Amino acid sequence: MDDGYAVSPASVVFPAVLRFAARVFPLGLELQLHKSKCFSPATDLESHPARPPSVAVGGVLLPEGPARGIIVGGVPIGEASFVTRHLHSNVADMVSTISTISTKLRDRHLQALWSVTYHCLQTRFHYYWLQHCSPSAVADAAAIADQALLEAAGTCLGDSVVQECSRRFGSQTTSTASSHVWGRVALSHRPRSRSLHRDVV
């Protein structure tokens, strides 16, 4: 079995998980409680009597103190500081990848760099975070991703093209807006709608 998620009040969910573990054990399946984590926005799980000692309270330790939360299907769920930390960590990895690929391809393979930027790199931020995190939570990290993509697009098409796109579209999009000029569809990382986290220009 792969990862599973249980949602309910603490007094209900922990006994239910233990019952599930007992039911699947005779089938040769062992629930890895020591790999499990829990989070509640309103209940103190650290001292909750129903929480098994082997189930850790999810979170990270920041300089200003602990930030509680867990990752659900790749998406951070928890306190604002936990979500921000996770998003910025992931966008840092994305920017590093963009920088590395741009450095390797920019001198001799600009067409390949454009294809990789358009089809592969810009979509890395979409699937989990833009579609499943609130616009207010993801905006800062998305702006960082946009800037890295704009720089990669500028390497391919020239800074003048990117600057013209920024002038023409401004706040409408900060992603690879140069695609619009060249008759392509680009996805803006910065969400502008509360109901739709992904915009198309």
Image: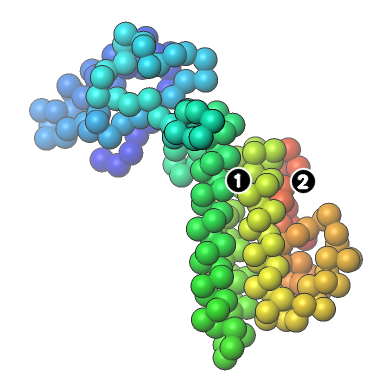
> Is label 2 in contact with label 1 (beta carbons under 8 Å)?
no
Q: Position of residue 100 (x, y in %)?
A: 51, 72
Residue lying at 77% horizontally and 77% vertically, measured from the top left: 159
User: For this rendering, which residue is in front, 125 or 198?
Assistant: 125
Drawn side of residue 165 relative to residue 196, left or right: right
Residue lying at 82% horizontally and 55% vertically, measured from the top left: 172
Colouring method of the image? rainbow
Q: Outermost residue, right direction?
A: 168
Drawn side of residue 21 relative to residue 194, left or right: left
- Amino acid bearing label 1: Gln
Q: Where does the N terminus fall, quadrant-wise? A: top left
Q: Residues within 10 Å of mark 2 (few under 14, many from 20)?
A: some
User: For this rendering, which residue is in front, 60 or 157?
Assistant: 60
Name the image quarter holding residue 84: top right
Name the image quarter holding residue 81: top right
Q: Position of residue 2 (x, y in %)?
A: 30, 42
Element assignment for label 2 = loop
Q: Is residue 108 visible?
A: yes
- Amino acid bearing label 2: Arg
Drawn side of residue 136 relative to residue 20, left or right: right
Residue lying at 70% horizontally and 68% vertically, measured from the top left: 150
Name the image quarter holding residue 8: top left
Residue labelled with disc 1: 131
Residue labelled with disc 2: 192
Q: Position of residue 147 (x, y in %)?
A: 69, 62
